[in-house]
Amino acid sequence: MIEADPAPILEACELVRRIGRGRDAFVLSVDRFALRPGEITAILGPNGSGKTTLLRVLAGDPHAAGQGQVHLARGRATLVAQRPLAFAGTVAHNASIGLLGQGLSRGLRRSRVQAALDRFGIGALADHDARTLSGGELRRLALARAFVIEPSVLLLDEPFDDLDAEGQRRLSLDLLRAVGETKIALAVVTHDLSRALLLADRIAVLVAGRIVQAGPRDEVLARPSTPTIARLVGMTNLATGRVVEHDGGIARIELDSGHVVAGAASMEVGERVWIGIRPEHLKLDVARGEGRSIGTARVESLLDDGIVTVVALALDGRFFTTHLLSGRGLARRLRSGDSVDIGVVPEQVHVRRLGDEPIF
């Protein structure tokens, strides 16, 4: 039995926010956007697409108000800005600011503040001067300050900025744990695709002020609706071609380069299409059964970070990439200039009708 999606805790409809005047004005125009309890939604998009503006509107910022409605089913929505601030006083005092004036006893305020600080690993700093915190500690304080008021919706703007790799890893784990324990609805704006994919249950893609695709993470990753979205979600191997044969749910597509790719798609013979292949789905050493061959490519470069080796390949003037586990198999043997047969499993080839949007 497939469980239905939980009802949204926050739902925005027909949002319009205009910034500036005249022909150069930026317009945020979102037909519908929803956040659900216990889920993390990553909001992706190029610089200037309106991601921060969207968060501010969802948070009810009066300076970002415009047309449309934002309905919050219960609780409150809290925004943690990209550049969090520390006020004069201790870390504990900073975390307690949202509780002032709520009529809570001193003991209850103290226990809620300590629990929030402990949740984000800075409980031992409660009595420290907040203005002496490092950048990573300050971010954790901002999150504790948000959680202490027990919001139902948390909106994070670039929470991983300026954190080193270990700081990003630890903060990601803390956020996953917090969402799991509190069932808060979390929306994250980040430019770090890999970090977004580690966290997200859902992805919303914002381009030029509009949400152009939204859905479960794996669906958006595997079936982006445009080449622009494909690039934003890491589907970097793109090409155009024409369907030359269709049989049993598999289309044979002749690329403009002359190579043929098989993809699981229902397309008419003669249709112009674009295809996308995620780097992790582009296979090497096809002779060992790793998919259907596309052709022989030349290894242009290998970039190894100790975990993943990114292999750049040239195929008749087009460049493709694939990912290999570092230190194993082909990742150990390949060298720049090598020739290698590349291929794909048809079910892992994304095929869409070619529209007006250029892919190169």
Image: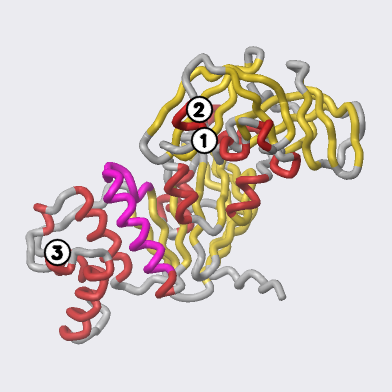
Q: Are marks 3 and 2 in contact (CB under 8 Å)?
A: no
Residue found 75% across the figure and 37% down from its top: 351
Front tag of 3 and 1: 1
Q: Is residue 100 above or below residue 279?
A: below
Q: Residue at x 56, y 43 (%)?
A: 206
Q: Nearer the viewer, residue 226 or 305?
A: 305
Looking at the rendered structure, the number of numbered marks drawn on it comes to: 3
C-alpha separation, residue under disc 3 versus residue under disc 2: 46 Å
Q: Does the segment drawn in magenta span residue 193?
A: no
Q: Report the quarter where the N terminus lies.
A: bottom right
| Residue at screen point 49% across, 52% down | 42
The residue tagged 1 is 323
Query: To which quarter of the image does residue 79 belong?
Result: bottom left
1 or 2: tag closer to the N-terminus = 2
Residue 182 place in picture, x, y as percent? 41, 74
Residue type at the position of mark 2: Val
**Is 218 or 345 nearer to us in this picture?**
345
The reply, left or right, for residue 110 in relation to residue 285 is left
Image position of 11 (left or right of 139): right
Secondary structure at numbered mark 1: strand
Q: Magenta stretch: give its range.
A: 158-179
What's the residue at 46%, 56% (across, down)?
Answer: 199
Question: In screen coordinates, is 244 left or right of 24?
Answer: right
Q: Quadrant of residue 350?
A: top right
Q: Which numbered circle lies on residue 179?
A: none
Q: Secondary structure at mark 2?
A: strand
What's the amino acid at mark 1? His
Q: Amino acid at mark 3?
A: Val
Residue 241 image offset from top left, x and y in percent = 78, 24
Name the disc covering residue 311, or none.
Answer: 2
Q: Is residue 44 above or below residue 201?
A: above
